[in-house]
Amino acid sequence: KMLKPPKSTAQPLSPHLTIYRIQLTSLFSIFHRLSGIFLSVGSLIFVYWIWSLAAGAQSYIQMQSIFQLWIVKLLLFFWTFAFFYHLVNGIRHLFWDFGKGYHLTHIYYSGYITLFLSIVITCLMWGHILKYF
């Protein structure tokens, strides 16, 4: 006897994204993953910059002229922010590894602190960098 395929239903097989409301915790998690990807791509640019140092003065001067473009400076600013966000959020995750801060109010509070510290540290660093340029 041959089996018949199941009848199709109008309902989705699993919950769909349109059912869920995006929460702050999921945004922090998604942004942590995206910042990791952005850091990986930015690291390739960093390696190219170091290579230009080793390749000689002409390569370094060419790379420095690229870094003077406003769009590149903006990307470097966001790369720096992604670095500090990933760092501070990683420290937040270390506390979770030790079983601290699992209460929902602590999770939200530490998320806001992570975002705040990332912004402050990034601005302090860029304030220091722009003092010399």
Image (cartoon, grey):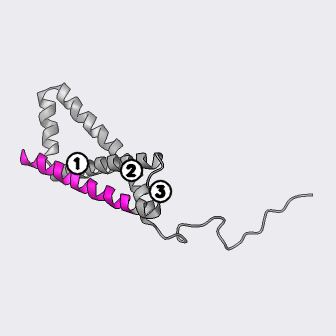
In the image, residue 22 above or below residue 82: below
Residue depicted at 27% across the width and 53% down the height: 118
Judged from the image, the secondary structure of the residue bearing numbered disc 1 is helix
At label 1, the amino acid type is Leu
Q: Which is more N-terminal, label 3 or label 2?
A: 2
Q: Secondary structure at mark 2?
A: helix
C-alpha span from label 2 to label 1: 24 Å
Specify whether 90 is left or right of 133: right
State how far apart marks 2 and 3 are (Cα). Answer: 11 Å
- Find residue 71 and report its horizontal and vertical position in percent: 19, 53
Q: Is residue 116 above or below residue 68?
A: below
Q: Earlier in the sequence, mark 3 or mark 1?
A: 1
Most foreground residue, 89 or 12 = 89
Residue at image coords 16%, 44% = 67
Horizontally, residue 24 falls left or right of residue 69, namely right
Could you tell me which residue is drawn at 46 percent across and 45 percent down? 98
Q: Quadrant of residue 28?
A: bottom left
Q: Residues within 10 Å of mark 2 (few under 14, many from 20)?
A: some
Task: Count neighbours of disc 3 (C-alpha within 10 A) and say few if under 14, some if 14 to 19, many if 20 or more.
Answer: few
For label 2, the residue is 92
3 or 1: mark nearer the eye: 3
Point out residue 22 in the picture as x, y percentages from the top left corner. Answer: 46, 67
The region drawn magenta spans 109-133
Instruction: Characterize the magenta stretch by its predominant secondary structure.
Output: helix
For marks 3 and 1, give the CA distance: 33 Å
Residue reaching furthest to the right = 1
Q: Is residue 6 magenta?
A: no
Residue that label 1 marks: 76
Circle 3 residue: 102
Q: Nearer the viewer, mark 2 or mark 3?
A: 3
The disc, 2 or 1, on the residue closer to the chain's N-terminal end is 1
Tell me the kind of residue under disc 2.
Answer: Arg
